[in-house]
Image: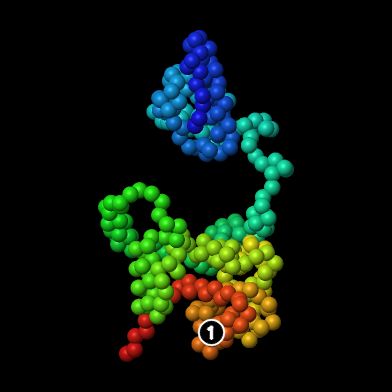
Amino acid sequence: MTVQSDNADPKPSRTRRLGGRRIYEALKAQIGEGLYQPGAAMPSTRALATELGVARSTVTSAYEQLLAEGFLESRQGAPTRVAPLLPVPAEGAGSIRLRSRHRLSAYGERMKMLADWATPAAVGREPVIDFRYGDLSTADFPILLWKRALSAAASHRPDRLTYGRPEGSLRLRTALQGYLWRARGIRCDAEQIIIVSGSQQRLDLCARILLDPADRFVVENPCYQLARQAFAATGAVPVAVSAREDGLDTGLLAHTNARLAYVTPSHQFPLGGVMPVSRRRQLLAWGSATGAYVVEDNYDGEYRRHVSHY
């Protein structure tokens, strides 16, 4: 919290009144804006006074006013906390909400209009069966191995503390280069590999770089909806092409006039089909002939089903 104190004022009593009032108004505004959530513990008067460089009594007077107005609650032996039910502030008091003159960019408006597929619809009670995908069981996560790897990484002293390269660590990209060659037969340079924070950042980068507004892009029907959103947010127009039991119907691509196709050939999402090699070649031939990009999402490529034969 930033509050300018009045320690330069030659009248100490007036300084305490002014300083306490400013602290009170700042805390009240922060509580109203949700910086301090209902039930959250407030800083101690001693700690806040030290942080602001004012007398403890100045902070105490601000807390007492907030307690009197019902913004805070306190009991013996417990920290002062934000009241669970706050009084409704007067219109405009401490408010920094957006006014009508503020607007989002065209990209932001498109994002706002897209449905939030990642958040399940609100229901009155927990569903009996949860069909959401992507939620992993914590029992399956190798916590001990992960903790060991984190400890090993934390003990490594880097040459300098600074931002890394935007495309990711060269050592990691070089290691991935070797892995892709061994495991996938993909021969590439480390400079062609980009490390991202997750699948949505990857799709967002592809969408921004490869598509312009009004471009057409192909998605499988049905498809991974968050990928469709990432591409549509650029202002591009989706073209749904049916996915058969063995993947995208590549015979329909010639009539799409699309600049990009987003596909999941190794394990079609959500139907699970695998695209045969002949149609994969047809897909690549279409991209080569039309200058369209083919974005393959190999979202579960590291998982393999092992079948035992008895």
Q: Indicate the position of residue 102 as horizontal and vertical percent values.
A: 69, 44
**265 left or right of 180 in image:** right
Q: How is the image coloured?
A: rainbow
Residue at (30% x, 59% y) in the render: 149
Q: Is residue 209 left or right of residue 78?
A: right
- Position of residue 309 in the picture relative to residue 118 (left or right): left
- Return the residue nearer the eye: 72 or 197: 197
Residue drawn at x 51%, y 13% is 9
**Residue 235: which quarter of the image?**
bottom right
| Residue 151 in sight from this viewpoint | no
Instruction: Judge whether 14 appears above or below 177 on screen.
Output: above
Secondary structure of the residue carrying tag 1 is: helix
Is there any visible trace of residue 56 in the rendered image?
yes
Instruction: Please state the total of marks drawn on the protein image.
Output: 1
Q: Amino acid at mark 1?
A: Arg
Q: Name the residue furthest right.
A: 100
